[in-house]
Amino acid sequence: MTRPLRNLISAVTLAALTGLLLAMCLPASMPPLFAAMGSMFAIVVGKAVFGGLGCNIFNPAHIGRAILLASFPQQMTNWVLPATAAASDAVSTATPLAVMRATEKIWQAGGAASAAKLPDLMNLFWGNVGGSLGETCVPALVLGGLYLIYKKLIDWRIPVFYLVTVAILTGVYGAVMGYPSTFPLYHLFAGGLMIGAFFMATDWVTSPITKKGKIIYAIGLGVLTSLIRLRGSYTEGVCYSILMMNMVTPMIDRFVRNVSFGGGLKK
């Protein structure tokens, strides 16, 4: 096999992977034309503009998602229940994070929110809630992430420190505000946190190189995601937190370096 042919096959494979990851971040009711436009944005704007394979600064799939969200907010926030996604009379529903935000307002006003308004934790865990195609089923995402860690395709530090940071910050916030003890579990299981932690934030090109750098990067992701979810007007923060930390990655790599064996860093 010639080198140009190998490069072509590699480029097509990575383009297909970018499209697949983007599809996992889109609602099931998203029109195919819009999804195709998002894939074009992800590959052209997110990757080719920066020089192609290995040169992109931002995660291409999340670039496509961010552009689609800014361009077609109504279609990007039209969620349906999994059981009715393929039916003609699909039932539109709110995401668990949106329901949680509405419930928080009731708690802050001193009212007692009905437990029926919040999705059951088991439904949230297994994915029987509204959301994007690939973000709802927690067991499948965790198993897939653990397989990637086992095969050493991703570094365990990024997803672990990312998830732990979100759990700690939302747990402390919930305790201070007097929310139920299950409050951090809702933030761990809901939204795109699991798919972002295992499959988006761990991108080799857009994440730091060193072990310490990966930890700093992951903690930054957790802080930004928690701030956007808890204090921002937008209920989800995974996409934008990853894009913002992608911008910081070159600076992390510059100041956090490995010490060579038998020597130290030059002053």
Image (cartoon, grey):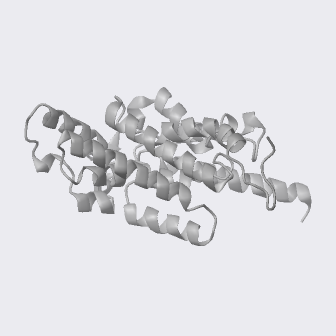
Residue furthest right as drawn: 2
Q: Quadrant of the N terminus?
A: bottom right
Res 127 visible: yes
Indicate left or right for 71 with 170 as reference: right
Foreground: 193 or 35?
193
* Image coordinates for residue 89, horizontal then vertical, percent: 27, 47
- In this rendered view, identify the residue nearer to me: 2 or 45: 45
In the rendered image, the vertical position of residue 93 relative to residue 147, given as above or below: above
Position in image of residue 15 (x %, y %): 68, 50
Closer to us: 10 or 173: 173
Q: Position of residue 164 (x, y in %)?
A: 41, 55
Residue occupying image coordinates x 20% and y 39%: 177
Left or right, 46 with reference to 178: right
Q: Quadrant of the C terminus?
A: top right
Say left or right for 99 vs 252.
Answer: left
Task: From the viewer's perspective, tell me whether residue 96 is left or right of residue 59.
Answer: left
Give the quadrant of residue 266. top right
Q: Residue at x 57, y 39 (%)?
A: 245
Residue 132: in sight, yes or no? no
Residue under the point 33% across and 58% down: 127
x and y percentages locating residue 130 in the rendered image: 31, 49
Q: How many marks?
A: 0
Q: Considering only vertical position in the picture, is 170 above or below 231?
A: below
